[in-house]
Image: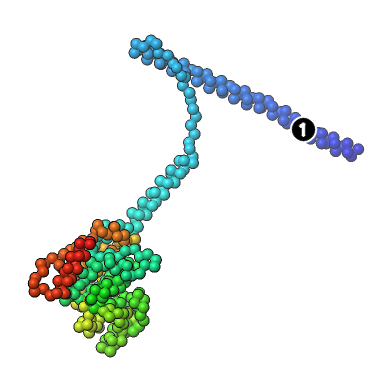
Amino acid sequence: EVASTQRLASLQSVLSTIKGQLAQIPKQQVGLSELVRADAVATDSLAGVEKELQNVILTESMAMGVSNLKVIDQPSVHESTPNVAGNGFITAFGLAFVIILLQYLLDPKVMRLGQITGRLSLPIEGWFPKLKPGMPMSQTLVSLQKLRLTVENWSNQGEKVVLVTSGSARDGKSTLAYGLALTLSENGSKVLLIDGNLAHPTLHIFCREQASPGLADFIENPTAAQAQECVRHVNDRLMLVPAGAIDPDNNPINTPAFLKLLKYFDPQVDVFLIDAPAAGGNLNALVLPKTETHVIAVARVGTTLVASLKVLAAQLAMLPVAESVLVINDVNEKTIATNVTSAAASSAFGAPAQAQQPVEARQTADTAEAVEANW
């Protein structure tokens, strides 16, 4: 009896489900009939459009006097759907291009050589190529020969003090100062390389010497004994005065003690090469020794800030600088070859050689002419 009751309940459930499905059939039939009716209306409309088109064609042909014109192919209507994937790719590519262009135009760093030469109206007297991993310094010194001739010309005129600075940090001025000191010493000049950047000294690392005692120690005790103690002999013609104790708030280059250091080594040195701190931070950042000084400004594509170049240019215009030249760092040789000027070298060796000219000066002039031909 229980089993019969359960079977009856199951049959009743199946019966109710079948009744529900049967109840949906009229609704489905109604929907199908509506679709058929809509299709018939669309077909009639299309036939009407085709008929109207034929009437228009016949009317135009009668107006032009053409009687044998007939319709060969009937017009067809094709539905078009948008290419979502293709349109999305084009939109994404366009947005990426716009973003990259805005970043390039709004980048605060110097990205083009013209941004440097447009703000620092100085003759380009040297360049430093891109340093590849494992490349020895000797392979890069050939690019500094033009600058070497300019510095030697200043030295021959009795103007020995040369200060190397830049607009921003990490512009490579210390590397440039070390490379220029090497090429000067290798060509016969006696050079005293002074690390005047007490905030971030690096020259003692390049020369593989101890950092102390150095310039900071001499400034505190400006005696002859201290001067001899703080100097390092890198080679026969190159001496180094390292920075000594780090003091970010101290810039001793314009102090009387610094001038005393220059006077002490003046009889032994042909060129004083000073690695100064970056001077693009504010209008008082560039400090010169209290003597006639030439300035080498270093700028680096992709690193130097455009604003710092403006500040450096303003200071060079205000301070009593003997002469300023520009050196471009980390550039391609082909890029710089079309932008190098020869103002300093031509002024240095433009005068005709006289019979009473010293032999060493004539050799320097011959070297200059060879370098100019290579340039």
Percent position of residue 217, x then y: 31, 84
User: Above or below — where is 52 with respect to 357?
Assistant: above
Residue 266 can be seen, yes or no:
yes
Residue at 46 percent of width and 43 percent of height: 88
Task: Name the side, left or right, on which 132 lies relative to 367.
Answer: right
Count of residue discs: 1
Place residue 344 in its image quadrant.
Answer: bottom left
Q: Crowding near pointer 1: few (<14 within 10 Å), some, many (20+)?
A: few
Give the colour scheme shown. Answer: rainbow
Residue at 29 percent of width and 84 percent of height: 218
Residue 177 can be seen, yes or no:
no
Residue at 37 percent of width and 64 percent of height: 132
Q: Label 1, on which residue?
A: 16
Place residue 193 in its image quadrant.
Answer: bottom left
Percent position of residue 314, x then y: 23, 65
User: Is 24 in front, or is 59?
Assistant: 59
Which element carries disc 1, helix, strand or loop? helix
Q: Quadrant of the N terminus?
A: top right
Percent position of residue 263, x then y: 21, 83
User: Is 82 in front, or is 294?
Assistant: 294
Q: Quadrant of the C terminus?
A: bottom left
Task: Name the side, left or right, on which 16 lies relative to 345.
Answer: right
Task: Name the side, left or right, on which 187 lies relative to 133.
Answer: left
Residue at 32 percent of width and 70 percent of height: 138
User: Is 283 in front, or is 156?
Assistant: 156
Query: Which residue is at the far left?
Result: 355
Query: Which residue is at the far right?
Result: 1
Q: Tag 1: residue type? A: Ser
Task: Name the side, left or right, on which 135 lies relative to 314.
Answer: right
Place residue 69 in its image quadrant.
Answer: top left
